[in-house]
Amino acid sequence: MATPGVGRSPDHEAWWRSAVVYQIYPRSFADSDGDGVGDLTGIVEHLDHIQELGIDVIWLSPVYRSPQRDNGYDVSDYQAVDPLFGTLEDLDRLLAAVHLRGMRLIMDLVVNHTSDQHPWFLASRGSRDVATSGWYFWRDARPGTVPGEPGSEPNNWGSSFAGSAWTWAPERGQYYLHLFSASQPDLNWDNPETREAVFTMMDWWLDRGVDGFRMDVINFISKDPRLPDGPLTRDGYGDGMPYFSHGPRIHAYLAEMKSRVFDPRPGSYLTVGEMPGVTPEQAREFTDRDRGQLAMVFQYEHVSLDADGDKWTQRRMSVNDLRDTLSRWQTALGDTGWNSLYWNNHDQPRVVSRYGNDATYWRESATALATVLHLHRGTPYVYQGEEIGMTNAEFAGIDDYRDIESLDYYARAVGTHREDVSVVLDTLRRRSRDNARTPMQWSAAPGAGFTTGSPWIGVNANHSWLNVASQRGVPGSIYEYYRALIALRHRLPAVVDGHFAAVETGRDQIYAFRRHLGDTALTVYANLSDQPVSLDRKDRLARDLVLANYPASRRDPDRLEPWEVRVYVR
Ligand code: NOJ
């Protein structure tokens, strides 16, 4: 079903190195039938927007059949589309429309776990005597304890959302492991039949014509088989990360996936592995082209700089830390390996509200952050709404939230730990994943042009002025700036292949770097702060300015204004 002419090159050329990816979170993108939830037809209707931005690849967050406990990251049928989003035929139509426009589409592959409603799990839970009995992690209660009572779990790991990582299944008389919610049991990759089932499913999608996969928490698929207790954390559970985030067989499994699924196919695919906790050294191994396990990974360091230990404990992000982290990853994956570049996704608060200034310097900080990101070496990702500078949700009360992680956190903080409600709400306002999930702001219409019905989650009130319609074709808008930035990548080979070197300016607020390729050198100066900052003589050298986020009339050769960015080429 692959569309001829698109996506398949005869060799294993790394086409994704020059690509820009756009992430769609389907439930919040565009609702074509007025039920308040975005759908596949809604996406088809808005492909012009994505194409005009200059996008090469769309990453579609999960649309598979799912009870939607974690908005589709809990899959109950990998080979069906959830009726909420449409049908398989709608998906084929979308794929064909994307290909017709010369773009590509990658699917979200959620195979560290399934939904607890997946037939594999339902059978496994019901009996030890079925084919899928060993497809999940089943363990007895700790010896000498009463099964099902707190404290009798097989180990002390906490789950990523809330509570223990183990749930008692009386039908089977055992506990099952879930690194996320109890509705997301972890698949046992040590079982060869489990792996084969996943690979067969991947084949099915590739045969349908998709161009690759974003792989959900793929570095968690190999667990230390002893499943040992982990060091205790603030919430009283053990941290299992040391035993599952880079487990003993992770390279073996990804190598097997490559040889079993991808190698037999002509052409090359975009594979990006989401990897919380991955180090630059590990990322280099995963993305080393000679090994060919993954095209790139999503690392977390630069989006963890404002968290102290766990995501709910805030600390101030310093520009020095940000610069150090970004340039360290650039250098570490400079010659071997490849970076993915992102600020936002469906799990992260909006970057303009988080690291930028969404009030006084909304436009300036959104464009400065975008410039820094897109002119790095690697493949940039734009999350829906980022291209118009969408901001955090500013929800008033707990009833506004929909996200399982946020609701679990609130229940624990307020219900169990008796924390102050206004403090907890303030934390959610800054940290909740729902900040990223409010409907795409297409227009100033009541449903923001997202829906004619009642949206599944509140529309941000600022859609009255912050929307696509008010920016498209408007010089100086964030949207038009993103277009220019993406066009620069497509025009200048130095943006794709240029060597990265940090430039020392002696100013804490400035992040400056250079990309060279042959005779071309591209230099970026960005003031990542609310204060103006003076420039040294050596940084004022006359060169060709190719991009700037302040108008010429406000550009002072001796200093950078708040959040001002300049890109020079020589
Ligand atoms: C990472 C996904 O991005 C997130 O949304 C999800 O909740 C977890 N993995 C579990 O699938």
Image (cartoon, helix red, strand yellow):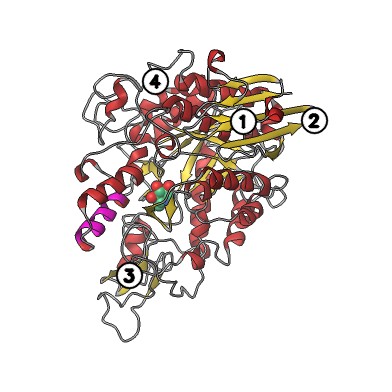
Q: Earlier in the sequence, mark 1 or mark 3?
A: 3
| Amino acid residing under circle 3 | Ser
Q: For this view, does 570 lie left or right of residue 383?
A: right
Q: Which of marks 2 and 3 is nearer the N terminus?
A: 3
Q: Report the Cα–Cα distance between label 4 and label 3.
A: 53 Å
Q: Report the Cα–Cα distance between label 4 and label 2.
A: 38 Å
Q: Do the residues labelled 4 and 3 touch (CB within 8 Å)?
A: no
| Amino acid residing under circle 4 | Val
Tell me where residue 134 appears, x and y as whole percent.
43, 68
188 within the magenta span? no
The residue that disc 1 covers is: 525
First to last magenta residue range: 406-415
User: What element does badge 3 sit on?
Assistant: loop
Nearer the camera: disc 2 or disc 3: 2
| Residue 96 in view of the camera | no
Q: Report the Cα–Cα distance between label 1 and label 4.
A: 28 Å
Label drawn at residue 518: 2
Foreground residue among 295 and 468: 468
Tell me where residue 17 appears, x and y as whole percent.
64, 36
